[in-house]
Protein backbone atom coordinates (compact mmCIF):
# COMPACT_ATOMS: atom_id res chain seq x y z
CA UNK A 1 0.00 0.00 0.00
CA UNK A 2 1.35 3.41 -0.94
CA UNK A 3 0.32 5.43 2.10
CA UNK A 4 -1.60 5.40 5.34
CA UNK A 5 -5.30 4.59 5.34
CA UNK A 6 -7.69 7.50 5.80
CA UNK A 7 -5.03 10.21 5.69
CA UNK A 8 -7.60 12.70 4.42
CA UNK A 9 -11.35 12.52 4.77
CA UNK A 10 -14.42 14.51 3.83
CA UNK A 11 -15.36 16.73 6.73
CA UNK A 12 -18.56 18.38 5.48
CA UNK A 13 -20.37 18.77 2.23
CA UNK A 14 -21.88 21.96 0.96
CA UNK A 15 -24.64 21.94 -1.61
CA UNK A 16 -25.27 18.22 -1.82
CA UNK A 17 -23.69 14.81 -1.51
CA UNK A 18 -20.11 14.01 -2.43
CA UNK A 19 -20.06 11.89 -5.54
CA UNK A 20 -17.54 9.23 -6.31
CA UNK A 21 -16.08 7.87 -9.53
CA UNK A 22 -14.09 4.80 -10.40
CA UNK A 23 -10.75 5.48 -12.12
CA UNK A 24 -8.47 2.95 -13.78
CA UNK A 25 -5.09 2.30 -12.17
CA UNK A 26 -2.17 0.86 -14.13
CA UNK A 27 -0.54 -2.42 -13.17
CA UNK A 28 2.85 -2.32 -11.51
CA UNK A 29 2.23 -2.44 -7.77
CA UNK A 30 -0.15 -4.14 -5.37
CA UNK A 31 -2.76 -1.70 -4.08
CA UNK A 32 -0.76 1.39 -5.08
CA UNK A 33 -3.43 3.79 -3.75
CA UNK A 34 -4.70 3.59 -0.16
CA UNK A 35 -8.07 4.91 0.95
CA UNK A 36 -7.66 8.51 2.09
CA UNK A 37 -4.82 9.27 -0.31
CA UNK A 38 -4.91 12.14 -2.79
CA UNK A 39 -4.88 11.05 -6.44
CA UNK A 40 -3.90 12.69 -9.71
CA UNK A 41 -4.56 11.96 -13.37
CA UNK A 42 -1.80 10.26 -15.31
CA UNK A 43 -0.35 12.52 -18.00
CA UNK A 44 -2.03 11.61 -21.31
CA UNK A 45 1.35 11.12 -23.03
CA UNK A 46 2.53 8.72 -20.33
CA UNK A 47 -0.78 6.84 -20.31
CA UNK A 48 -1.09 6.46 -24.07
CA UNK A 49 -2.90 4.51 -25.35
CA UNK A 50 -4.74 4.19 -22.00
CA UNK A 51 -6.47 7.42 -21.04
CA UNK A 52 -8.54 7.84 -17.90
CA UNK A 53 -5.86 6.56 -15.53
CA UNK A 54 -5.25 7.88 -12.05
CA UNK A 55 -2.32 7.39 -9.70
CA UNK A 56 -1.38 8.17 -6.12
CA UNK A 57 -0.22 11.74 -5.72
CA UNK A 58 3.43 12.42 -4.91
CA UNK A 59 5.04 14.41 -2.13
CA UNK A 60 4.59 18.12 -2.79
CA UNK A 61 1.60 17.62 -5.10
CA UNK A 62 -1.39 19.87 -4.76
CA UNK A 63 -0.56 22.47 -7.38
CA UNK A 64 -1.89 23.46 -10.78
CA UNK A 65 0.84 21.23 -12.31
CA UNK A 66 -1.21 18.13 -11.50
CA UNK A 67 -4.78 17.25 -12.35
CA UNK A 68 -6.25 16.28 -8.97
CA UNK A 69 -8.80 13.45 -9.37
CA UNK A 70 -9.90 13.35 -5.72
CA UNK A 71 -9.31 11.57 -2.44
CA UNK A 72 -9.39 7.78 -2.64
CA UNK A 73 -12.58 6.37 -1.16
CA UNK A 74 -11.22 2.81 -1.30
CA UNK A 75 -7.93 1.00 -1.72
CA UNK A 76 -7.02 0.43 -5.37
CA UNK A 77 -7.29 -3.08 -6.82
CA UNK A 78 -4.17 -3.03 -9.03
CA UNK A 79 -1.50 -5.73 -8.79
CA UNK A 80 2.03 -6.06 -10.10
CA UNK A 81 0.76 -7.59 -13.34
CA UNK A 82 -2.92 -6.59 -13.63
CA UNK A 83 -4.45 -3.13 -13.91
CA UNK A 84 -7.14 -2.29 -11.41
CA UNK A 85 -9.34 0.57 -10.29
CA UNK A 86 -9.91 2.91 -7.39
CA UNK A 87 -13.04 4.70 -6.22
CA UNK A 88 -12.39 8.39 -5.43
CA UNK A 89 -14.45 11.24 -4.04
CA UNK A 90 -14.65 13.69 -6.96
CA UNK A 91 -13.24 17.15 -6.13
CA UNK A 92 -16.44 19.13 -6.47
CA UNK A 93 -16.43 22.73 -5.21
CA UNK A 94 -17.80 23.05 -1.68
CA UNK A 95 -16.37 19.81 -0.33
CA UNK A 96 -14.37 20.38 2.85
CA UNK A 97 -11.61 17.87 3.54
CA UNK A 98 -9.67 17.35 6.76
CA UNK A 99 -6.20 16.01 7.51
CA UNK A 100 -3.33 16.34 9.95
CA UNK A 101 -0.77 19.13 9.73
CA UNK A 102 2.72 17.93 8.75
CA UNK A 103 4.27 19.64 11.77
CA UNK A 104 2.09 19.78 14.88
CA UNK A 105 3.62 23.06 16.02
CA UNK A 106 2.21 24.88 12.97
CA UNK A 107 -1.36 24.25 14.11
CA UNK A 108 -1.35 23.70 17.87
CA UNK A 109 -2.99 26.96 18.96
CA UNK A 110 -6.23 28.57 17.85
CA UNK A 111 -4.28 31.67 16.80
CA UNK A 112 -2.09 29.57 14.47
CA UNK A 113 -5.09 27.81 12.92
CA UNK A 114 -6.81 31.17 12.43
CA UNK A 115 -3.68 32.63 10.82
CA UNK A 116 -3.50 29.69 8.37
CA UNK A 117 -7.02 30.33 7.05
CA UNK A 118 -6.80 31.15 3.35
CA UNK A 119 -3.22 29.96 3.00
CA UNK A 120 -2.59 27.94 -0.19
CA UNK A 121 -0.25 25.00 0.47
CA UNK A 122 0.52 21.46 -0.76
CA UNK A 123 0.27 17.83 0.35
CA UNK A 124 3.20 16.16 2.08
CA UNK A 125 4.10 12.47 1.95
CA UNK A 126 6.71 11.51 4.52
CA UNK A 127 7.29 7.92 5.65
CA UNK A 128 4.12 6.76 3.84
CA UNK A 129 1.99 9.28 5.77
CA UNK A 130 -0.08 11.96 4.02
CA UNK A 131 -0.37 15.34 5.75
CA UNK A 132 -0.90 19.01 4.91
CA UNK A 133 2.30 21.05 4.67
CA UNK A 134 1.00 24.13 6.50
CA UNK A 135 4.54 25.54 6.61
CA UNK A 136 4.82 25.59 2.80
CA UNK A 137 4.99 29.01 1.22
CA UNK A 138 1.64 30.44 0.16
CA UNK A 139 1.57 30.46 -3.65
CA UNK A 140 -1.05 31.13 -6.30
CA UNK A 141 -0.32 27.73 -7.94
CA UNK A 142 -0.98 25.80 -4.69
CA UNK A 143 -4.45 24.28 -4.54
CA UNK A 144 -4.78 23.01 -0.95
CA UNK A 145 -6.51 25.99 0.69
CA UNK A 146 -6.67 25.84 4.49
CA UNK A 147 -9.95 27.16 5.88
CA UNK A 148 -9.71 26.25 9.57
CA UNK A 149 -9.21 23.28 11.81
CA UNK A 150 -8.89 21.98 15.35
CA UNK A 151 -5.72 23.00 17.18
CA UNK A 152 -6.26 20.29 19.85
CA UNK A 153 -5.69 17.54 17.28
CA UNK A 154 -3.67 19.55 14.72
CA UNK A 155 -6.29 18.62 12.12
CA UNK A 156 -6.70 21.21 9.38
CA UNK A 157 -9.79 21.68 7.22
CA UNK A 158 -9.18 22.53 3.57
CA UNK A 159 -10.80 22.87 0.20
CA UNK A 160 -9.10 22.00 -3.07
CA UNK A 161 -9.02 24.84 -5.60
CA UNK A 162 -10.90 23.81 -8.71
CA UNK A 163 -8.18 25.29 -10.96
CA UNK A 164 -6.02 22.20 -10.30
CA UNK A 165 -8.62 19.46 -10.73
CA UNK A 166 -9.73 17.27 -13.60
CA UNK A 167 -13.03 19.12 -13.41
CA UNK A 168 -11.55 22.59 -14.09
CA UNK A 169 -7.88 22.30 -14.99
CA UNK A 170 -6.06 25.62 -15.32
CA UNK A 171 -3.09 25.59 -17.70
CA UNK A 172 -1.53 28.70 -16.22
CA UNK A 173 -1.08 30.13 -12.75
Image: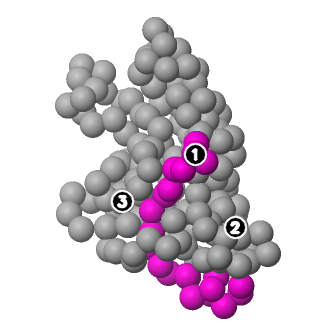
- 48 sits to left or right of 146: left
The residue at the far right in this view is 152
Dot 1 alpha-carbon crowd within 10 angstroms: few under 14, some 14 to 19, many 20 or more: few
Examine the structure image and report whether residue 127 is included in the region drawn in magenta: yes
Q: Earlier in the sequence, mark 2 or mark 3?
A: 3
- Residue 161 visible in the current orientation: no
Dot 3 alpha-carbon crowd within 10 angstroms: few under 14, some 14 to 19, many 20 or more: many
- For mark 2, what is the residue? 155
| Callout 3 touching callout 1 (CB < 8 Å) | no
Mark 3 to mark 1: distance in Å? 21 Å
The boundaries of the magenta stretch are 109-129
The residue at the far top in this view is 81
- 33 sits to left or right of 173: right
- For mark 3, what is the residue? 63
User: Which disc is residue 127 wearing?
Assistant: 1
Which element carries disc 2, helix, strand or loop? Answer: strand
Amino acid sequence: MAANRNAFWISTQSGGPAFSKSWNVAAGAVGSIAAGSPTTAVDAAAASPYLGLTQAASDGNGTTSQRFTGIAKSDSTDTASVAGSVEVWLPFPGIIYSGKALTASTADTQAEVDALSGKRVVFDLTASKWTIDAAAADAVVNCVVIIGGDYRSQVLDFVYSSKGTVLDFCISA
